[in-house]
Amino acid sequence: MELKILGSGGGEGFPALFCECDHCKAARKAGGKSLRSLSQTLIDGKLLIDLPAATHAHCLAHGFGLGHVEHLLITHTHADHYVPEILDTRGGGFAHNMAAEKLNIYGNKDVKRRFEGTFELFPIGKEIRESIVLHVVRAFEPFTAGEYKITPIKACHAFEEDSLNYIIDDGEKALLYLVDSGYPYEETLDFINNYGKKFDCVVMDATMGDSYYKGHMNHDENKKLKEYLISSGACDKSSKFIITHITHNHTGTHEYVEKIFAGSGIEVSYDGYRIKF
Ligand SMILES: [Zn+2]
Ligand SMILES: [Zn+2]
Ligand SMILES: [Zn+2]
C-alpha cells in the first residue's frame, strides 16, 4: 500500500490564513516542509480520504486529477475535511472523459445531510448529482470499497457528530488512520486490538503539540499510543508511525517538530510525504 499525505496541517492550515503568531511567521520564513495545507490523504493514488477546499491546490501541486477516483472516505464534517461545494464541477460542462463513472462517498449521516443541504440551496446538474453516491457508514461496521475492506472506527473528535476514523485493509496490508482524533476511546482500542491482523502503518492526529484537548492528540499522546499499540500486539516494531494535522497554535516549524520526535520511531509528515509499506 502506498500512502501520500497531501495536506499535513491542522484546521486553519500552517501558517494560518489570518495569523501573525511567531510560529506562523517562522513557518512562512522557513517555507518547504513547514508550509502545511489542509488535511487530505491519498492511498495507492486512488482512494481519497477527506475533501478540503485545498483539494484543487493539492491536485495542482502533485500533478494529478480526481477523474479516476471512485471512492472517497470522509472522517467528519469540519471544513478542513469536507467541503462538498467543490463537487459541483464533477461532470456536466466542467469535467470530461472521467475514468470513474461514479464517485462513492462514505461518511456519517451528517456528511450526507451536509451534501444534501448544500445542493438544495445551490442545485447542481442532474447528471453531476446522479454520478455521486452517498453511503452512510457506522463505526465498527465494515464495508467494501473497490479492492479495499474499510472499517470505520469511532473517533474521539467533533462530539456533536459521529466522527469516524478508518481501518483500510487491502487484503495484505492494514492501515490505521486516526485523523482527526484525540487519544482513542477504550472501545476503539479494544476493536483495534481484536481486528485480527497487525497494522503496518498508523497515521496519528498530532494537533495539540505541547498542549492538551480531549478531541485531538498531543505529542506525548502520539508517543504513548505508539508504545501502547506495540505492547498490545496491534502493531509491531516494523509498523510505521506517522503524525499529521500539525498546527501553529501548539508547535513550531517542521525542523522543530522533527527534533521533538527524534529517536521516537515516529515520522513527522509534511505535504507530499509518501510512504510504501
Ligand atoms: Zn481537522
Ligand atoms: Zn499562527
Ligand atoms: Zn475536526
Image (cartoon, helix red, strand yellow):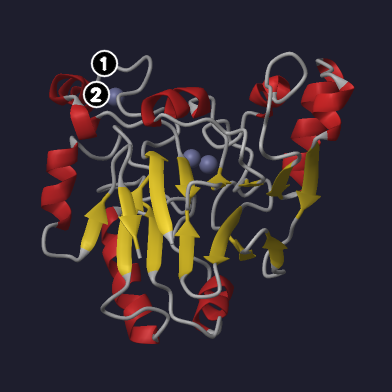
- Residue 168 is left or right of residue 23, and the answer is right
Q: Which mark is residue 172?
A: none
Given residues 244 and 201, the one toward you in this image is 201
Which residue sits at x=35%, y=65%? 277
Q: Which residue is mark 1?
A: 20
The percent position of residue 30, horizontal first and vertical second, equals 14, 25
Residue sitting at the far front:
97
The percent position of residue 101, horizontal first and vertical second, equals 75, 39
- Residue 35 is left or right of residue 244, and the answer is left
Contact? badges 2 and 1 (CB < 8 Å): yes
Looking at the rendered structure, the kind of residue marked 1 is: Glu
Q: Is mark 2 within 8 Å of ligand 2?
A: yes
Q: Secondary structure at mark 1?
A: loop
Looking at the image, residue 99 lies above or below residue 135: above
Q: CA distance from mark 2 to mark 1?
A: 6 Å
Q: Is mark 1 within 8 Å of ligand 2?
A: yes
Q: Secondary structure at mark 2?
A: helix
For disc 2, the neighbor class at 10 Å (few under 14, some 14 to 19, many from 20) is: many
- Give the position of the N terminus as an image quadrant: bottom left
The percent position of residue 250, horizontal first and vertical second, equals 28, 39
Looking at the rendered structure, the kind of residue marked 2 is: Cys
Q: Which residue is mark 2?
A: 24
- Residue 201 is left or right of residue 73, and the answer is left
